[in-house]
Image (cartoon, rainbow, N blue to C red):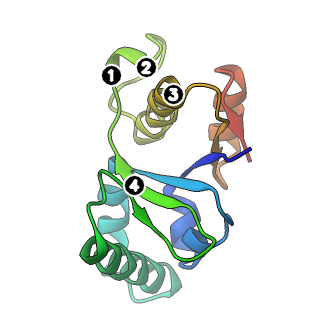
Amino acid sequence: MKKTYVLDTNVYLTDSEALYSFANNDIVVPLKVLEEIEKHKKRQDGVGANARFTIRTLDLLREKGNLHKGVRLGKGKGILSVKSYNPDHLPKELDPQDADNQIICTAITEKANVGRRKVIIVSRDINMRVKCDALNILGE
């Protein structure tokens, strides 16, 4: 069964080719992730290079179609889309200003929209994966 992966900012900053690592599964880029990547693009190290590469990749995909509606990543690959979240889906205990919580809420919103399909957050952040588990969101 096809899955939807929601990638945390640290995934893009660690591996600029991460978008192409999920076979024929779909990828959702939370709008908050774009803001966070923007903050790193001027760095003169590997993180900055990955941020710039990710932004260029998304810009090239934008030329192929609408990022909100979704753009196919290539033959045998899934569809990438950039999405926001419904703040009503954020549990009241979580700070709505926290970037991680906004990314988690994007996954919760996506889960509400895709029905039975698995929605999985991918993050290098241990605490984010723990929060996801507590909220019944799959985390890798």
Q: Earlier in the sequence, mark 3 or mark 2?
A: 2
Residue corresponding to mark 2: 90
Give how far apart the Cα atoms at labels 4 and 2 are: 21 Å
Q: Distance between the residues labelled 3 and 1?
A: 10 Å
Question: Which numbered circle lies on residue 108?
Answer: 3
Q: Which of 24 and 85 is in front in this view?
A: 24
Given the image, on which type of amino acid does mark 4 rest?
Ser
Residue 101 lies, in percent from the top left, at 46, 32
Image position, residue 20 (x, y; %): 60, 73
Secondary structure at badge 3 equals helix
In this rendered view, identify the residue nearer to me: 128 or 7. 7
x 74%, y 44%: residue: 1
Cα distance in 3D space between marks 3 and 2: 8 Å
Q: Which of marks 3 and 4 is nearer the N terminus?
A: 4
Looking at the image, which is closer to me, 131 or 109? 109
What amino acid type should be assigned to the residue bearing mark 2?
Answer: Leu
Location of residue 114 with respect to 45 vertically, above or below = above
Disc 2, SS: loop
Above or below for 56 versus 66: below
Q: Single out the mark in the foreground, 4 or 2.
A: 4
The residue beneath circle 1 is 87
Q: Disc 1, disc 2: CB below 8 Å? A: yes
| Chain-order first, disc 3 or disc 1 | 1
- The answer to which quarter of the image holds residue 75 is bottom right
Q: Are marks 3 and 2 in contact (CB under 8 Å)?
A: yes
Residue 81: numbered disc: 4
> What mark, if any, has residue 13 been given in the picture?
none
